[in-house]
Image (cartoon, rainbow, N blue to C red):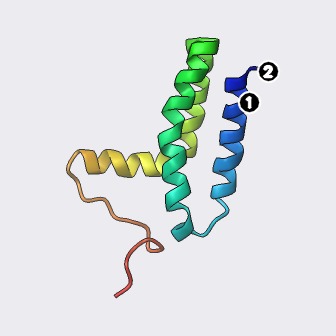
């Protein structure tokens, strides 16, 4: 197996591990994984082509659909609501 696919598998394991954290503890490692994903997908695309990259992109969007939905709403100028676990307590 190529280095890019091994890194992709490790990324999936790390993302799954982060999902077990309480919601407040997911932010920092989740942002790192969110930022690392396009770089990793580009590396996979470089080594394996567009079809394998598309499969990886679909997996990425599936795993990070809620953060991506939130960021998309923020980019459009909307004010999306955070989950109760992330809201500041008064």
Note whether 39 is above or below 79 in the view shown. above
* Coordinates of residue 64 in the picture (x, y in percent): 52, 46
Q: Quadrant of the N terminus?
A: top right
Instruction: Say what secondary structure mark 1 lies in.
Output: helix
Residue 1, labelled with which disc? 2
Note whether 53 is above or below 58 in the view shown. above
Residue found farthest to the top: 49
Picture quadrant where residue 25 is located: bottom right
Q: Residue at x 61, y 24 (%)?
A: 55
* Coordinates of residue 52 in the picture (x, y in percent): 63, 18
Residue found farthest to the bottom: 90
Note whether 3 is above or below 25 in the view shown. above
Q: Residue at x 63, y 57 (%)?
A: 18
* Coordinates of residue 75 in the picture (x, y in percent): 26, 45
> If you read the primary sequence from the N terminus, does the residue marked by circle 2 or circle 1 appear first?
2
Distance, label 2 to label 1, CA atoms, is 7 Å
Note whether 1 is above or below 23 in the view shown. above
* Coordinates of residue 19 in the picture (x, y in percent): 63, 58
Q: Which residue is mark 1?
A: 6
**In the image, is 84 to the left or to the right of 42?**
left
Instruction: Say what secondary structure mark 2 lies in.
Output: loop
């Amino acid at each position: 197996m190529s280095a890019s696919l091994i890194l992709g598998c490790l990324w999936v394991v790390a993302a799954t591990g982060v999902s077990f954290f309480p919601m407040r503890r997911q932010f920092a490692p989740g942002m790192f994984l969110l930022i690392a994903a396009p770089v990793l997908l580009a590396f996979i695309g470089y080594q394996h082509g567009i079809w394998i990259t598309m499969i990886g992109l679909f997996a990425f969007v599936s795993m990070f659909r809620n953060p991506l939905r939130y960021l998309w709403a923020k980019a459009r100028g909307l004010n999306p609501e955070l989950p109760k676990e992330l809201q500041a307590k008064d």
